[in-house]
Amino acid sequence: MPDRVHRTYPTARAYAISTGAFALGSLVLWFIAVRLGITAVPRIQVKPEWLLFGGALMFVAFVGSETFALRVEVRRETILVSLSELPAIYGLIVLPGWVVGVSHILAGLVVFICRRDNWRAIRLNVAIIAAESGVGALIATAVPFGWAEQNKYPILGATVGGVFAAVAVAQAVRVHYWMLGTPEPLRRSLERSLLTAGTCAIFALVVFTLIHSPLQPTGYLLCGALALVAVVLYRTYSQSLRQHTDLSRMYAFGRRVAEIGSDTDDWHALIEQVRDQLNASVALIHLNAPNGEFETLAVGTEGVLVEEPPAADDPLLQMAAEAGRVHVSHLDHNDASFRKALEARQAGDVLVVPLRSGDRDRGYLEVRDRLSRWGRFRENDLTLLETLSSHVATALDNLRLLETLRHEAYHDAITGLLNWRGLTVEIEASLASSSISAVMLVQLDILPEVNNAIGHDRGEQLLSAAGERLVAALGQDRLVAHIESDRFAVLLPSSGDNHLLEMATDLLEVVGRAYSLDGIEIEPHAHAGIAHVSVAAGGIEGGAAGEDVSTLLQRAEMALMAAQSSDEPIRTYGASMGQVFRRRFQLVTQFRKAVEEGLITVHYQPKLSLKDRELVGVEALVRWTHPEFGPVSPAEFVEAIETTGSIDTLLGHVLHIVLAQVAEWRGRNMRISAAVNLSVRNLSGPNFPQVIRAALEKHGVPPELLTFEITESSVMADPERSLPILRELHSMGIQLSVDDFGTGYSSLAYLRRLPIDEIKIDKSFVQGMVTDLGDHAIVRAIIDLGHSLGLRVIAEGVEEEAARDALKSLKCDELQGFLLARPMPIEKLEAWLTTRTVKTAAVGDRTQVLRLVG
């Protein structure tokens, strides 16, 4: 049996304290008793040669009384009725107290060793016997000599000694539970100990009285018959109680199995129950390991043991696997391999059963060397171990199932890496141990294109390959997580800031290299954002760990978005980023309220025909004056709300204002069209053409007086979805215009397919055309291209007369810019129309058009 103890239970400390207390007390009692015995008058003269013989007889008597102690169980209380008071009474009558005490101590030691009790129990019981004998000897010596002839002093000494022993044992048990943190009330402890002591004393006195009473032979026969009946009743009752106890312990074991977790201490406690239930010196579980070897957990009488796992070809385990159970003892097995296996275990009697669930073996359950007076396991012990093994196998199955479910809950199915939930748990643990310096989010920005172009299976190959690269670079898979789409999170180990940035840059370079998927080269557009742990943790004073994790990931997200928007490969979180995103968040959350309160207004910028200087229409430009931020750029808040459903709310609000104004102008016989900027996300709204038709009908505005401006790049990003909607709008008579033409990346083939009426040259070319021959050539090419496709061409951003004249010479159709007028609210526009235009009648139309004067 292994002699290295890994951990001891609190019980050992309780045994040590109790043993020390009783040993010290017995020394004091015997010292006083011996001192009194030296000065006392001898009660009975005993020859020295008879002391050895009397001590031997007392030894035999005490061995018999300790061996055949009666055990009575009443509900949960156990009463041990020892016969040691009988030899103690007779011994104190004829022998000195020290002879009786030494005989009792030696007899108890021999019985406990033969019974193979554990040493801590032996030490405690011997100390209690020494104290019990000391009490008896002290009382027998101290009582006046006048009682000697009545033999009352030895009876009194032995009885009081027995009472003392019972009370002492009860208090030792109380100390034991106190050490375990579950103290027993003093009153209950005393009541139980006095009941035990009374039972022992009464039994001893009755036997003593029967022996010394002048009974007739029939009386002795009657007493013998009654004793035989008592023995039969005791055996029957004891067996019944033992079965009840076994069932209770089995039920408790089943509950323990149901509550078992993956904690090693839980399993050690379970194995301890197996050992205790079979009264074995050692209990072990050999669990099958993935590498074909075993992982062994062992518990002995002194606590958790360090046990080397057995070899895969261990004969006992092989026999248990074949036969389903095995009982090997050195007494009845001569096989050399079995004897060698027993010697390796340092045991003489071993039970082994497999932990079998269905047709799979989970391992083996083993117990060694029964702790009992007979010292061997029986057939019913093997049956009990089989029952326990089935419970343990069930616990293993449940644990494996829980581990599988937990793994699936915390890991990504595609890459096998941590998912978002697992990442959160890992960050919490890393923050607690200060083992990471930062969190880096990496996005490849290529997965949607891969899925659409070559299939989702290739997309999954891409994600797996990216995860493998990151794990290989870091060396630990727990530091990498796949959280969504083609985005990964990396926990950067603790290091200096300069080295940390170098590490992050190297990781981004590794994961950003080209991927070969079945011969197809994929070039990702990888970006990364970094958030330092010190920044996140310091930003939440006294915050909980979960808040730190949330803040850390949020800041890494901000840094990633900053990298993507600035087209930088990697960005580190800074305080200014938090302000930008908080501002963006406020714009999104406060937008609808701003619409309801009328804070979202419309400004108008006129558009002029270069050929005849007529006002052909206006462009409606949305404006928001925020109560905290002041005027907010349309590009800023439109981009913020574009990813939400609020973009449809914005369009509906602007359309209502603009169409109402166009209707009002028509009521004054003024033909002024209005252009409204349209987001590509508006096109994906439900029944978008029907919504526009209903808005036109509500305000009574002809479709040709409404123009939707769309950007070239947004439409060409997904032409297959946008083109059918645009065609339906165009068929309704609504004018369509391509804004910022020349800055997109679409092909001319797609442009030819667009159902548009006009294109607007981006102001970056118009403003540079006077001084830059390249911009002049681009403007000329766009005008010629537009006319060749039958489209109107509008130049926006015109601020100089030279640019106006150049555009007129190139036969551009219309212009728009600060040279003509800045965007203005409706009141200023009305004043501008009054002072800068005159009304002229349109040919064949009752409405009037406006012509610029001056």
Image (cartoon, rainbow, N blue to C red):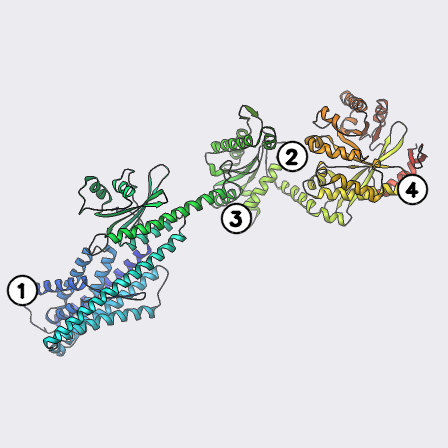
Contact between marks 1 and 2 (CB within 8 A): the answer is: no
Residue corresponding to mark 3 = 545
Q: Nearer the viewer, residue 589 or 508?
A: 589
Whether residue 512 is visible here, answered yes or no, is yes
Q: Quadrant of the C terminus?
A: top right
C-alpha gap between disc 1 and disc 3:
81 Å
C-alpha gap between disc 1 and disc 2:
109 Å
C-alpha gap between disc 1 and disc 4:
146 Å
C-alpha gap between disc 4 and disc 3:
66 Å
Residue corresponding to mark 2 = 565
- The residue type indicated by label 2 comes to Ser
Q: Earlier in the sequence, mark 3 or mark 2?
A: 3
Mark nearer the viewer, 4 or 3? 4
C-alpha gap between disc 3 and disc 2:
30 Å
User: Can you name the residue that lies furthest to the bottom here?
Assistant: 146
Q: Earlier in the sequence, mark 2 or mark 4?
A: 2
Q: Nearer the viewer, residue 465 or 801?
A: 465
Q: Earlier in the sequence, mark 1 or mark 2?
A: 1
Q: Residues within 10 Å of mark 4 (few under 14, many from 20)?
A: few
Mark nearer the viewer, 2 or 4? 4
Q: Residue at x 55, y 48 (%)?
A: 547
Q: Label for residue 725?
A: none
Q: Label for residue 49?
A: 1
Q: Secondary structure at mark 4?
A: loop
